[in-house]
Image (cartoon, rainbow, N blue to C red):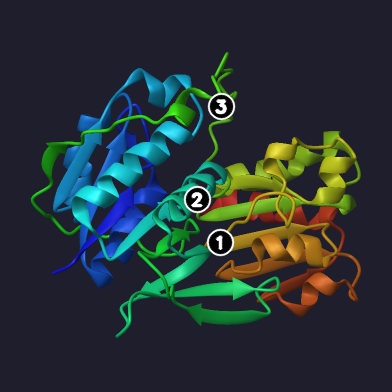
Amino acid sequence: MAEVLVYVDHVDGAVRKPTLELLTLARRIGEPVAVALGAGAENTAAVLAEHGAVKVLTADAPEFAEYLVVPKVDALQAAHEAVSPIAVLVPSSAEGKEIAARLAVRIGSGIITDAVDLEAGDEGPVATQSAFAASFTTKSRVSKGTPVITVKPNSAPVEAAPAAGAVEALAVTFGALATGTKVTSRTPRESTGRPELTEAAIVVSGGRGVNGAENFAIIEALADSLGAAVGASRAAVDAGWYPHTNQVGQTGKSVSPQLYIATGISGAIQHRAGMQTSKTIVAINKDAEAPIFELVDYGVVGDLFEVVPQLTQEIQTRKG
């Protein structure tokens, strides 16, 4: 069976969930060959093998940590040359999409970004995408070179499928551009104890109707009762009520959770572009004519300051 390269997103050997989802999709079209780079790369082998990787190519060098994405592109290109895969899958993060785009240019291939599904086709892998704020679903394939495809988190289940997971060292020669942009410092993001926004199974977002930074506490309380991530609309972020890193929308992050709860959000196209692929959408808004109600599975017309605390209390009671 043909091999599929899967770029591994990990932190010091701890593999992040979107990579395990990629392995599920890779198995639909071939045999997954994982590429793990940087510190702790070899420690990823066990979990990758458990989820279907027949082989794990690893490389570690100071360049991966000290410089921006080009060293990783060099390594992925080396893996492409060594394996000759039928496709290269990369998580659809900001860094992942930059790596994928640079790789596609390097190897003269087409690229598909933000895929939400993948299937085998007679002429190569076929990717499903949501277009125009999920108003349309498209299926497409790359017609030139090895398809490079980035996949949105939460697009596939994480499935155990034990495989060999043989670890092999990947020989990488860094090009002149690899050291062109040096990382001078890093500041760890302060942990909230909540799931990563783009990976969360449940997201609770607040918008203009929250009416102030201090009122996001009730949004956070609902999120915490559900084990959810907290999002915000552009209006809330622009007003300074919540950090930009939590913005959901066309100019923020795209999310596809199992459950998305929009509170005090009107549903402008900018916001819908970032959350409309959510599996189940619930909206709470006192304006019965708000556009958000056009796409929801369940809608509550009411004051969020009355509805959200009651919902939080009910969830806590049932959990208790």
Amino acid type at image mark 1: Ser
- Mark 2 or 1, nearer chain start: 1
Residue hosting label 1: 256
Determine the residue positioned at 40% across, 36% down.
72
Determine the residue positioned at 13% across, 47% down.
165
Mark 2 burial class by Cα count in 10 Å: few <14, some 14-19, many 20+: few
Mark 3 burial class by Cα count in 10 Å: few <14, some 14-19, many 20+: few
Q: Is residue 299 left or right of residue 198?
A: right
Q: Is residue 302 left or right of residue 254?
A: right
Mark 1 burial class by Cα count in 10 Å: few <14, some 14-19, many 20+: many
Question: Residue 319 — which label?
Answer: 2
| Disc 2 versus disc 1: nearer the observer | 1
Q: CA distance from mark 3 to mark 1?
A: 22 Å
Determine the residue positioned at 85% across, 65% down.
302
Q: Can I make out residue 304 in this image?
A: yes
Q: CA distance from mark 2 to mark 1?
A: 25 Å
- Mark 3 or 1, nearer chain start: 3
Which of 275 and 32 lies nearest the eye of the viewer? 32
- Mark 3 or 2, nearer chain start: 3
Which of 181 and 52 lies nearest the eye of the viewer? 181
Amino acid type at image mark 2: Lys
Residue hosting label 3: 191
Q: CA distance from mark 3 to mark 2?
A: 25 Å
